[in-house]
């Protein structure tokens, strides 16, 4: 794992604005930094722009204005061919999972390794291990459409962490699971965080944020992001 | 190569249903064009071989009473001149019966032509190694024997060879054109496939796939479809070409030399499915790269 010494910033936003098409700005003037190795919650009402902010972080969108710096690279200046290398350092749990319905969950979780050219023997070893850890050992060959929402969510999380990313962006990762599993997943994130992964969890589950209130939180309201310290 | 891992569900695409047939047709047409080009080559070589080394002297018949005897004298004089020419090994005048036999396939019943004032022909065989000044010989012949002229087969032969060569280039052009059409179809099919699987491609990108990771999957699929279709086309072409060759062999009346395909021809046709597969693969790959490069 390539982890930088904590203290250095892994993400920096400077006066970032975002609008979709010709609509009004979803995000206005967003500025913050996240040190490497930190753990942040991202909160805000539904429609506030949490997913949009994450999309900017995983390079799924470019800002309409302002500057986004990721791993010391100004995103505005990165070329298309440089994106895959950056994205491999980021794991994403999408709010809508984005699993590939025609692939088994084993193959879904193996994807980040396959695109990196990891050997099949390695894949056959690590992927079932991780899936067993998230409680899906029985479903290795099932296709996502046959799984429950909570099971899909765990597949999505497994896919996000299998590549040992430096930055993990999780969009409502506990939205569809019961409390017990939610806690288990949060402990997984904490564990990864201890190993050096920078974590951002977007959620509107206030209970969860309160329970893990030792982590700082960024709150989005009216297009503005403000820091709520623990 | 064909069974490499693929994340994109390309097997179920409509492309999988029509592409092999299309490539089959293209390979079939290419095989016909290639076979024609090689068959023409064989014919040309034989013409060259058959006709070089022979010349024809033509003596115009003298009209009127006693003309026949006079013509006969001139034929004899012409034979005499040719026999004394350096490099000539044999001189042989065709008699009226042989002439009729030659003309029969074209004019039918010989009774009709019996009375026509036909020119008399004399076959002259040359020593293939000797250098003969044909222009000088022809001039001497015309000077000595009125109404006699030397007809150099090589003149019309060269025109025939020119024509054949044009037809060969045409065949090459047809094959190139077929390749271009196949390529264009693959471009279209690939773009359609990319639109259908837009979301999967986006996910692959977001988890760090390089463009080539995606391009390779389309390329592998195109190769498999192209090769399968190509083999079908070949399976179709072989019996058809065999039948044409067989029919031509029965038809040929001495004028068309034996039609056959040289070994290189068989090899070229045998390689067509692989060529089609390669064209499809390269096209698909560059189409994916081109399309992805235009994304933001
Ligand atoms: N692709 C899009 N095109 C146009 N508008 C969009 C798009 N995605 C999001 N929006 C708009 O941007 C705003 C923020 O959406 P976003 O999905 O970021 O909210 P969110 O905070 O993640 O909400 P939730 O908690 O419900 O997931 C919303 O008003 C939404 O309508
Ligand atoms: Mg959201």
Image (spheres, coloured by chain):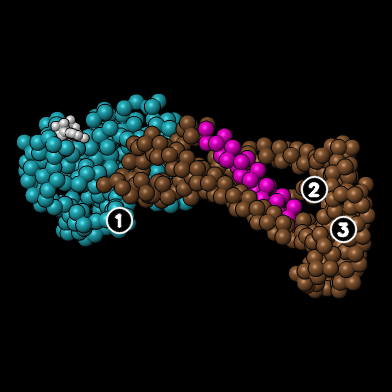
Chain colours: A cyan, B brown
- Between marks 2 and 1, how big is the CA–CA gap? 68 Å
Principal SS element in the magenta part?
A: helix
Q: Quadrant of residue B55?
A: bottom right
Foreground: A101 or B44? B44
Q: Which residue is mark 3?
A: B122
Mark 3 Cα-neighbour bin, 10 Å: few <14, some 14–19, many ≥20: many
Q: Which residue is mark 1?
A: A82
Q: Answer whether residue A98 is magenta in the image.
A: no
Q: Chain of mark 2?
A: B
Q: Position of residue B163 (x, y in %)?
A: 65, 53
Q: Are marks 2 and 1 on the same chain?
A: no
Q: Which residue is mark 2?
A: B255
Q: Is residue B133 above or below residue B266?
A: below
Residue drawn at (84%, 57%) of the image? B59
Q: Are marks 2 and 3 on the same chain?
A: yes
Q: Position of residue B34 (x, y in %)?
A: 65, 48
Residue drawn at (78%, 56%) of the image? B46
Some atom of ligand 1 lies within 8 Å of the CB belonging to the residue at label 1: no
Foreground mark, 1 or 3?
3
Q: Position of residue A56 (x, y in %)?
A: 20, 45
Q: Answer whether residue B24 is magenta in the image.
A: yes
Residue B126 in sight in this render: no
Task: Tell me where the magenta segment starts and ends, as one range.
Answer: B18-45
Q: Quadrant of residue A44?
A: top left
Q: Chain of mark 3?
A: B
Direction from residue B135 to residue A102 in the image, left or right: left
Foreground mark, 2 or 3?
3
Q: Name the N-terminal-most of marks 2 and 3.
A: 3
């Amino acid at each position: 794992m390539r982890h930088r010494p904590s203290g250095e910033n892994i993400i920096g936003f400077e006066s970032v604005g975002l609008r979709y098409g010709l609509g009004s700005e979803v995000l206005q003037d967003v500025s913050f930094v996240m040190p490497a190795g930190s753990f942040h919650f991202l909160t805000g009402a539904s429609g506030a722009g949490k997913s949009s902010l994450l999309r900017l972080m995983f390079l799924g969108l470019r800002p309409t204005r302002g500057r986004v710096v990721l791993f010391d690279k100004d995103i505005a200046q990165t070329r298309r061919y440089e994106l895959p290398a950056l994205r491999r350092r980021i794991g994403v749990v999408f709010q809508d999972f984005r699993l590939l319905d025609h692939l088994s969950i084993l193959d879904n979780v193996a994807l980040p390794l396959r695109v990196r050219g990891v050997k099949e023997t390695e894949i056959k070893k690590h992927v079932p291990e991780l899936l067993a850890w998230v409680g899906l050992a029985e479903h290795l060959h099932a296709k996502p459409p046959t799984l429950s929402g909570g099971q899909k969510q765990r597949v999505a999380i497994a896919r996000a962490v299998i590549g040992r990313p430096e930055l993990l962006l999780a969009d409502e990762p506990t939205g569809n699971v019961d409390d017990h599993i939610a806690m288990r997943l949060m402990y997984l994130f904490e564990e990864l965080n201890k190993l050096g992964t920078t974590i951002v969890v977007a959620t509107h589950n206030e209970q969860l944020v309160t329970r893990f209130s030792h982590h700082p939180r960024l709150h989005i309201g009216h297009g503005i992001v403000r820091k709520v310290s623990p | 190569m064909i069974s490499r891992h693929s994340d994109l569900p390309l097997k179920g695409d409509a492309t999988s249903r029509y592409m092999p047939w299309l490539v089959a047709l293209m390979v079939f047409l290419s095989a016909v064009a290639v076979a024609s080009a090689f068959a023409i080559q064989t014919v040309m070589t034989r013409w060259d071989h058959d006709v070089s080394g022979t010349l024809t002297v033509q003596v115009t018949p003298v009209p009127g009473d006693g003309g026949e005897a006079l013509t006969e004298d001139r034929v004899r004089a012409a034979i005499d001149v040719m026999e004394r020419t350096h490099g000539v090994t044999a001189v042989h005048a065709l008699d009226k019966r042989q002439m009729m036999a030659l003309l029969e396939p074209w004019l039918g019943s010989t009774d009709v032509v019996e009375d026509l004032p036909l020119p008399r022909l004399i076959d002259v065989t040359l020593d293939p190694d000797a250098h003969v000044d044909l222009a000088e010989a022809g001039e001497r012949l015309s000077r000595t024997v009125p109404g006699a002229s030397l007809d150099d087969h090589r003149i019309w032969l060269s025109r025939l060879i020119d024509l054949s060569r044009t037809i060969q280039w045409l065949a090459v052009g047809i094959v190139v054109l077929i390749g271009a059409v196949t390529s264009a179809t693959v471009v279209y099919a690939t773009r359609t496939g990319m639109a259908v699987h837009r979301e999967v491609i986006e996910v692959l990108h977001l988890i760090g796939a390089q463009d080539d990771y995606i391009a390779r999957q389309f390329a592998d699929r195109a190769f498999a479809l192209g090769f399968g279709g190509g083999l079908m086309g070949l399976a179709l072409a072989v019996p058809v070409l065999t039948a044409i060759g067989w029919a031509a062999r029965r038809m040929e009346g001495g004028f068309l030399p034996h039609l056959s395909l040289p070994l290189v021809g068989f090899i070229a046709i045998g390689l067509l499915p692989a060529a089609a597969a390669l064209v499809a693969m390269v096209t698909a790959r560059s189409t994916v790269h081109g399309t992805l490069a235009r994304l933001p």
